[in-house]
């Protein structure tokens, strides 16, 4: 039997149906420049895709941009000093225009149409990861921040990606306390700010978890989250983010 949406959902349902009808006739517009996409394009046109601020060379462990390509197995100075517990981080773009503007619009302007576009960029990176990844974990927001924002941008990025790769999006991890905003803090301050920031509520059955976030700054958030996951039985952790800042 066809399940009809609840009365309160009608407006959204009708809008969704109209949008789908519209997209079947008229192709969607590029999220960055607004031109109508060609048949082979999705949310981002080829021109904008090639103009995005791609990172040329990065540390394979933490995704920090580096001047020249590092030999296989050699990591940046920061990772050598303090090796993180994850296998790899991929953050293909610099946190510069128009990536920063798009991510800010998504997070603070509720421009949720950016989420599937950024998820398409994440999907392009998927073949670079180890094939044993068995779950995606969006970096959780503190419940108060999520309640205020109404959504978690990392979850919005994870869902379309998970659908494409056929893996589950897992939860069960929370921010144990509301951490201060990371921007403007020094590296030691960030470490203190994030110590024991995450609580994993149950033993996780996933063996290789891919942490998904919008921006990686120093990698301190993902370091702490990876540690919390490994303490609760996860064997391996990798990280995927849209952009690398700092
Ligand atoms: Zn475009
Ligand atoms: Zn590194």
Image: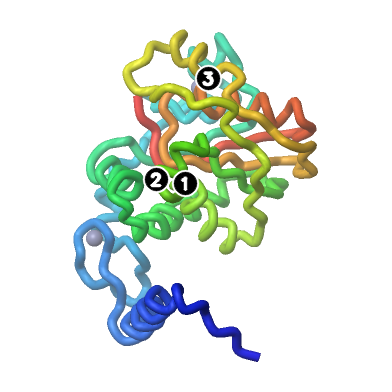
Q: Is residue 20 depicted above or below 2 in this figure? A: above
Earlier residue among tags 2 and 3 = 2
Q: Position of residue 61 (x, y in %)?
A: 55, 27
| Residue at image point 27% right, 64% down | 30
Question: Which of the two discs, 1 and 2, sits closer to the camera?
Answer: 2
Q: Could you give the CA–CA distance between mark 1 and mark 3, rounded to whole angstroms?
A: 18 Å
Relative to 30, 226 lies left or right: right
Q: Where residue 95 appears, x then y in whole percent? A: 31, 36
Q: CA distance from mark 1 to mark 2?
A: 7 Å
Q: Are marks 1 and 2 in contact (CB under 8 Å)?
A: yes
Q: Name the residue that disc number 3 marks.
A: 194
Asked if the residues shown at circle 2 and circle 3 are in contact, with their CB atoms under 8 angstroms apart, the answer is no
Position in image of residue 13 (x %, y %)? 43, 78
| Depicted 235 relative to depicted 123: above or below | above
Residue at left 38%, top 58%? 117
Mark 2 → mark 3, Cα distance in angstroms: 21 Å
Q: Secondary structure at mark 1?
A: loop
| Residue placed under numbered mark 1 in the picture | 152
Q: Is residue 219 visible?
A: yes
Which is more toward the observer, 214 or 127? 214
Classify mark 1: residues with Cα within 10 Å, few (<14), some (14-19) or many (20+): many
Residue furthest to the front in view is 7
Say whether mark 2 is within 8 Å of ligand 1: no
225 displayed left or right of 54: right
Where on the image, by quarter, is ligand 1?
bottom left
Q: Residue at x 30, y 73 (%)?
A: 28
Ranked by sequence position, the earlier of labels 1 and 3 is 1
Residue 22, by quadrant, is bottom left
What secondary structure is found at the residue carrying circle 3?
helix
In the rendered image, residue 120, in percent from the top left (x then y), is placed at 44, 58
Type of colouring: rainbow
The residue to which callout 2 is attached is 149
């Amino acid at each position: 039997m066809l399940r009809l949406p609840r009365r309160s959902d009608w407006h959204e349902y009708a809008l969704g149906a109209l949008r789908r009808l519209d997209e079947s006739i008229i192709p969607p517009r590029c999220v960055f420049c607004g031109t109508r996409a060609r048949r082979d394009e999705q949310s981002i046109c080829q021109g904008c895709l090639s103009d995005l601020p791609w990172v040329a060379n990065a540390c394979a462990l933490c995704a920090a941009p580096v001047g020249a390509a590092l030999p296989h197995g050699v990591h940046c100075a920061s990772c050598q000093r303090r090796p993180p517990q994850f296998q790899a981080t991929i953050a293909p773009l610099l946190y510069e225009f128009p990536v920063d503007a798009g991510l800010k619009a998504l997070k603070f302007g509720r421009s949720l149409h950016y989420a599937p576009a950024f998820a398409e960029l994440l999907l392009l990176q998927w073949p670079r990861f180890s094939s044993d990844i068995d779950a995606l974990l969006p970096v959780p927001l503190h419940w108060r921040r999520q309640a205020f924002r109404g959504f978690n941008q990392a979850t919005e990025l994870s869902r379309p990606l998970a659908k494409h790769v056929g893996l589950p999006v897992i939860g069960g991890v929370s921010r144990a306390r509301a951490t201060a905003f990371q921007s403007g803090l020094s590296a030691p301050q960030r470490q203190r700010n994030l110590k024991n920031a995450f609580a994993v509520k149950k033993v996780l059955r996933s063996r290789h978890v891919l942490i998904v976030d919008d921006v990686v700054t120093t990698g301190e958030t993902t370091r702490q989250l990876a540690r919390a996951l490994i303490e609760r039985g996860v064997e391996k952790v990798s990280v995927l983010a849209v952009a690398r800042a700092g």
